[in-house]
Image: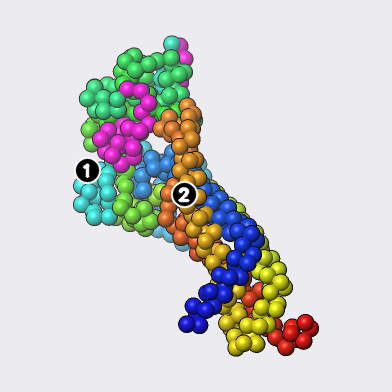
């Protein structure tokens, strides 16, 4: 009964100053709306930017790195076992550049329940022959179906059909930058020179655009068999094994595990793309800071309104306390007023924030650098809405706490005597 009475009194005080209450609620609504829209847009932008590289990067990359032998012959000599040996200009050993026992490694990886998929790869340096000019480039020999499934390869082929790499012998998907330099289109025949001096004719079956201009000026794609033939190697020759995991957070641990287990070099996606993760974190942090600042400003508006209400309602507060209401009851009345403003404004803010995000997500965004993007990126994440309503409630609670505490300490005798 008492709680019902407190709620009734709170509603009466709210309606007595409904214009000021409406202004405070609008402030909270505006803050929550901008908070949701900002985080949704920034979340979508982070996914877009990270997707340009991170989504096309294996969670764990197994490869063979060319490096000098750590143990030199002099270190094995008994006469120098306890000496510090300094060897200058150490050259790497003359050894194969492929991953040894790649077939067995791939078989074991496919049986690992932590692994979503495996995509073998052959990377070779070539020269694109354009008349008398040779352009430096890189051809990535891929398992076409695995690359499309695990790394969305098909999304970046802007001309031609990616599956033709598998079905057409001696074919290539050129990077857009390379294609523009060579003035070729789908269906043309180009000539390349391998690092071993072998000249090969390839049919262009597609144009590839990643959105990273420097990569598109160099990289092209062929089937595994074509890349192996360009290098003059057998069908078992692989320079990379790309691994995609069910849980990306396991990548650092599993990279070390694969390196020790298979005697290969391995790098995880977090290490390979640490700069992108840092950029995403900074952008998200800025969004949260701006949104929280807006909510704090709205909280100050509620604080000022409640302060003015207390000064105007001194008589009413004194009468309440004189008729048996305790300081705790008065405190509850003003905190309930603040929370009512916060919840009402917050719920409206969530609705308007969702609507504004949806509108932004329909605005056309066409750029030649990002052919797969048609509208501004938006991420609809329930977490953003939960953070917004919780922070709105907390902010308005503290905005009403100090005025409520002041009202609860009013001495009714002093107020009535003054009157």
Q: In this view, does 401 lie to the left or right of 272?
A: right
* Foreground label between 1 and 2: 2
Q: In percent of the image, x 60 and y 74: which residue is there?
A: 334
Name above or below for residue 165 compared with residue 29.
above
Quarter of the rendering containing residue 137: top left
Q: In percent of the image, x 42 and y 52: which residue is there?
A: 381
Out of 276 and 127, give the one closest to the viewer. 276
Out of 229 and 375, give the one closest to the viewer. 375
Tell me where residue 86 appears, x and y as whole percent: 51, 51
Name above or below for residue 48 compared with residue 161.
below
Residue 4 circle label:
none
Quarter of the rendering containing residue 199: top left
| Mark-to-mark CA distance, 1 and 2 | 50 Å
Q: Is residue 125 left or right of residue 289?
A: left
Q: Which of marks 1 and 2 is nearer the N terminus?
A: 1
Tell me where residue 288 appears, x and y as whole percent: 55, 55
Residue 103 circle label:
1
Name above or below for residue 219 compared with residue 352.
above
Q: In percent of the image, x 57 and y 82: which residue is there?
A: 329
Q: How crowded is mark 2: few (under 14 residues within 10 Å), some or many (20 or more)?
A: some
Quarter of the rendering containing residue 195: top left
Tell me where residue 351 appears, x and y as whole percent: 47, 52
Q: Determine the residue located farthest toward the top in the rendered image.
A: 131
- Inspect this view and state whether residue 312 appears: yes
Out of 307 and 143, give the one closest to the viewer. 307
Identify the magenta region.
132-160
Tell me where residue 344 appears, x and y as whole percent: 52, 61
Q: In percent of the image, x 63 and y 76: which residue is there?
A: 404
* Residue 153 inside the magenta-drawn segment: yes
The residue that mark 2 highlights is: 354
């Amino acid at each position: 009964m008492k709680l019902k009475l407190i709620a009734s009194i709170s509603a009466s005080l709210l309606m007595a100053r409904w214009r000021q209450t409406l202004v405070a609620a609008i402030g909270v609504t505006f803050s929550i709306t901008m908070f949701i829209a900002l985080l949704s847009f920034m979340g979508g932008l982070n996914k877009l930017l990270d997707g340009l590289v991170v989504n096309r990067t294996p969670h764990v990359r197994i490869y063979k790195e060319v490096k000098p032998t750590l143990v030199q012959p002099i270190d094995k000599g008994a006469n120098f076992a306890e000496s510090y040996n300094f060897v200058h200009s150490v050259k790497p050993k003359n050894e194969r550049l492929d991953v040894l026992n790649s077939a067995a490694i791939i078989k074991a990886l496919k049986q690992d329940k932590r692994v979503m998929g495996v995509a073998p790869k052959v990377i070779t340096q070539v020269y694109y022959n354009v008349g008398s000019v040779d352009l430096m480039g890189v051809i990535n020999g891929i398992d076409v179906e695995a690359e499309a499934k695990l790394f969305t390869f098909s999304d970046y082929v802007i001309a031609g059909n990616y599956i033709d790499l598998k079905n057409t012998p001696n074919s290539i998907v050129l990077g857009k930058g390379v294609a523009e330099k060579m003035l070729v289109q789908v269906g043309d025949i180009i000539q390349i020179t391998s690092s071993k001096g072998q000249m090969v004719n390839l049919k262009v079956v597609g144009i590839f655009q990643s959105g990273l201009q420097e990569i598109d000026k160099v990289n092209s794609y062929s089937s595994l068999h074509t890349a192996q033939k360009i290098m003059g190697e057998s069908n078992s020759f692989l320079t990379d094994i790309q691994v995609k995991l069910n849980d990306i957070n396991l990548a650092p641990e599993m990279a070390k595990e694969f390196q020790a287990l298979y005697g290969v070099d391995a790098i995880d996606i977090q290490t390979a793309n640490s700069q992108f993760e840092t950029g995403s974190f900074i952008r998200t942090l800025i969004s949260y800071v701006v949104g929280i600042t807006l909510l704090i400003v709205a909280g100050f508006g509620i604080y000022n309104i409640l302060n003015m209400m207390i000064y105007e309602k001194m008589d009413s507060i004194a009468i309440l306390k004189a008729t048996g209401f305790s300081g705790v009851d008065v405190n509850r009345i003003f905190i309930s007023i603040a929370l009512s403003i916060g919840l009402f404004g917050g719920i409206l803010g969530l609705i308007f924030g969702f609507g504004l995000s949806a509108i932004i997500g329909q605005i056309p965004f066409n750029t030649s650098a990002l052919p797969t993007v048609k509208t501004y990126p938006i991420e609809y994440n329930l977490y953003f809405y939960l953070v917004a309503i919780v922070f709105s409630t907390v902010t308005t609670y503290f905005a009403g706490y100090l005025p409520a505490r002041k009202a609860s300490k009013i001495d009714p005798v002093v107020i009535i005597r003054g009157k």
